[in-house]
Image (tube, rainbow, N blue to C red):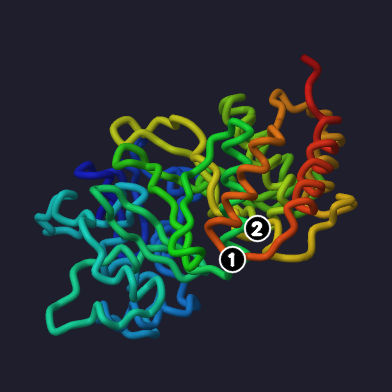
């Protein structure tokens, strides 16, 4: 069997998952740095505890108890945001044959709408490799894939506000839109059929420090040091994501919801992926602590202080633009929140970050 990148063989492996990399440039970063093919395939499967996962599996003619490997392999471990897939010996299909062109299970996966299930066979669906814990669904609109998420309204509002704040600050953010007065939120596929999104866990690995203590692969200093050694621009992009996380108290950043974009033709890292997956921030978890006495902001600034790092960028958000953001949210949803309290929360956070900017 082979891990393919488009129509090019990158890794050859057998049923025991013994492998040989045959194209170093195009092989997945995860395989090059971690080497666990079975785990890599399993991580591409729909999260089995997601509320609508059972319906998606059964409709795809899988047992609801099907394991992650079987689930991913039902669609050759292909997904929307990269061009990797598994090709078995004797398989004559090309990437053009197996890539997803539509999604019959969009609304079933998103909101358990059973009307998609008819007498005709269901086409291959990207929902079997649509990862994450929230109910969601890929929908193709005018030739572009959009990922819809079915979240509580406070998470939709938090995700959208974070997106707008990032844009206002001049940061690279995935595009989000609120749908149906806050029923759903959708984000545009930023890989555009040109790039592969490779999660940062393909670069970072759990390890031990000099004293033998375990360090996880989401440790601030470890990640910053590794990225700095690769390219200072990547390290700066990482700090920008961390800074926004700190500003909006996004506690759920982990090594499978941020990453890098690699060129599908060369395998080279082009840039960090745009910032995405910010639903576990702001109103999603607690009342806003306008005094900013703890949380992610304090963890991040402690790291900056202990590592003697000054940010090479400033996060500035124009107050007129801020008011436009809050007005827009109130116009698009019925969520009740205090714009004044949110403003105090954000600008107090910006004041904390100012102490860590590099002097101009």
Could you tell me how many numbered marks the image carries?
A: 2
Q: Quadrant of residue 60?
A: bottom left
Confirm or deny contact between disc 1 and disc 2 (CB under 8 A): no
Residue 234: x and y, percent? Answer: 57, 30
Residue at the image point whose x is 50% and y is 78% from the top: 49
Residue at the image point whose x is 70% and y is 32% from the top: 315
Residue 332: x and y, percent? Answer: 53, 57
Check residue 334 in the rendering and tell me which mark sits there, or answer none: 1
**Residue denoted by label 2:** 252
Q: Is residue 175 visible?
A: yes
Badge 1 local density, few (<14 within 10 Å), some, or many (20+)? few
Calculate the distance from the C-alpha at mark 1 to the C-alpha at mark 2.
Answer: 25 Å
Residue at the image point whose x is 46% and y is 52% from the top: 177
Q: Looking at the picture, does residue 204 appear above or below residue 74? A: above
Residue 132: x and y, percent? Answer: 49, 64
Task: Pick out the residue farthest to the left.
Answer: 92
């Amino acid at each position: 069997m082979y891990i393919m990148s488009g129509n090019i063989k990158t890794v050859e492996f057998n049923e025991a998952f013994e492998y040989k990399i045959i194209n170093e440039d195009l092989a997945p970063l995860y395989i090059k740095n971690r080497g666990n093919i079975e785990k890599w395939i399993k991580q591409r499967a729909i999260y089995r505890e997601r509320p609508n996962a059972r319906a998606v599996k059964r409709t795809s003619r899988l047992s609801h108890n099907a394991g992650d490997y079987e689930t991913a392999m039902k669609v050759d471990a292909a997904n929307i945001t990269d061009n990797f897939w598994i090709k078995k010996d004797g398989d004559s299909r090309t990437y053009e044959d197996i890539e997803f062109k539509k999604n019959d299970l969009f609304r079933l996966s998103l909101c358990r709408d059973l009307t998609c299930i008819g007498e005709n066979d269901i086409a291959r669906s990207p929902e079997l490799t649509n990862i994450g814990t929230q109910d969601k669904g890929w929908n193709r609109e005018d030739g572009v894939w959009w990922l819809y998420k079915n979240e509580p309204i406070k998470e939709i509002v938090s995700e959208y506000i974070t997106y707008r704040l990032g844009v206002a600050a001049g940061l690279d953010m995935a595009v989000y839109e609120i749908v149906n007065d806050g029923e759903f939120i959708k984000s545009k596929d930023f890989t555009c059929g040109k790039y592969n999104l490779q999660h940062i866990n393909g670069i970072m690995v759990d390890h031990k420090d000099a004293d033998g203590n375990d360090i996880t692969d989401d440790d601030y200093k470890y990640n910053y040091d590794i990225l700095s050694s690769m390219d200072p621009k990547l390290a700066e992009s990482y700090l920008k994501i961390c800074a926004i996380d700190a500003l909006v108290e996004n506690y759920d950043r982990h090594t499978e919801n941020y990453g890098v974009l690699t060129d599908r033709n060369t395998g080279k890292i082009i840039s960090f992926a745009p910032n995405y997956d910010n639903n576990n921030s702001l109103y999603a978890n607690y009342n806003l602590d306008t005094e900013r006495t703890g949380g992610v902001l304090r963890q991040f600034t402690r790291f900056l202080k202990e590592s003697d790092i000054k940010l090479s960028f400033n996060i500035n958000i124009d107050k007129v633009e801020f008011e436009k953001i809050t007005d827009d949210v109130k116009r698009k949803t019925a969520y009740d929140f205090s714009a004044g309290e949110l403003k105090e929360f954000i600008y107090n956070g910006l004041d904390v970050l100012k102490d860590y900017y590099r002097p101009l």
